[in-house]
Image (cartoon, rainbow, N blue to C red):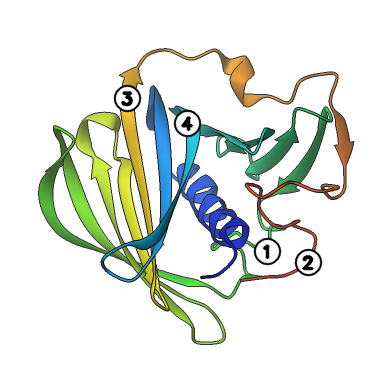
Amino acid sequence: MNHPRKIIGLFLAVVLVLAGTAARADFIADQYITISLGEIGENARIFPAKVYSRQKQLRVEINNAGRSVVHISRGDKRPPVFWMLMPDEKMYVETVGGENPLDPFSPKSGVKIEKVFIAKENVAGRPANKFKMTWRDKEGNKRIGFAWEAIDLNNAPIRQEFFREGEHVLVQLANIKVQKLDPALFEVPSDYKKITAPPNPGPAGPPAPKTPGP
């Protein structure tokens, strides 16, 4: 199995970018990322997170082994802005849209994304549209998955599955609460220091965004 940190980093990069492409409903939810081997889900590892969605803004909070990392996507800004906050150190990294090598829509990534509608299904009691997702990078590598977008949440993805080289990544939202959110949740606190690269984002954080990658 690939390092979970790399997998979660790639997943977060895609989710944060896609979050900025459309206005979502305002809600809070628990998110569970399950990484396992094969179709029967061997050696499963579960990574919990907290998700805050507000229009074209997204906040994802991860706490792993006692270390906190917060990812914020601001798709309402032009160009879009992505922040990775490290609350323990009161530091943050800023990446502007188009500069992020993990951004699948960036010319630097060389990634092509295909999204094909499959069917309407119910997920956790909510009506959803199911899509087949295909990513191809400039080296020809391919990742295939599925996404279920909740119709009553302005097409917010509430379930996602990805497959590659024998790995299965399942992302689910639970305990969804629709409510108005404080805009301050999607801002960098005034006492945080801006840095160029994280000193060590920990096992739950994504790779440093300073060098090109997939």
Give the distance between the C-alpha atoms of the residues marked 4 and 1, in whole angstroms.
Answer: 23 Å
- Judge by depth and name the residue closer to the eye, 181 or 12: 12
Tag 1–tag 2 contact (CB < 8 Å): yes
What residue is shown with label 2?
211
Tag 2–tag 3 contact (CB < 8 Å): no
> Does the rendering let one see residue 22?
no
The answer to whether 190 appears left or right of 127 in the picture is: right
Residue 169: where, in percent of width, then height? Answer: 40, 59
Which one is closest to the eye, mark 4 or mark 1?
4
What residue is shown with label 3?
176
Residue 176: where, in percent of width, then height? Answer: 32, 25
Residue 150 is drawn in which quadrant? top left
What residue is shown with label 4?
51
Give the distance between the C-alpha atoms of the residues marked 1 and 2, in whole angstroms.
Answer: 7 Å
Q: Earlier in the sequence, mark 3 or mark 4?
A: 4
Residue 182 is drawn in which quadrant? top right
Please state which amino acid type lies under the numbered disc 3.
Ile
The answer to whether 198 appears left or right of 56 in the picture is: right
- Quarter holding the C terminus? bottom right
- Judge by depth and name the residue closer to the eye, 32 or 46: 46
Residue at 47% x, 38% y is 48
141 is higher (above) or lower (below) than 51:
below
- Mark 1 neighbour class, 10 Å CA radius: few under 14, some 14 to 19, many 20 or more: many
Q: Earlier in the sequence, mark 4 or mark 2?
A: 4
- The secondary element bearing badge 4 is classed as strand
Residue 68: where, in percent of width, then height? Answer: 67, 33
Which one is closest to the eye, mark 2 or mark 3?
3
Residue 205: where, in percent of width, then height? Answer: 66, 48
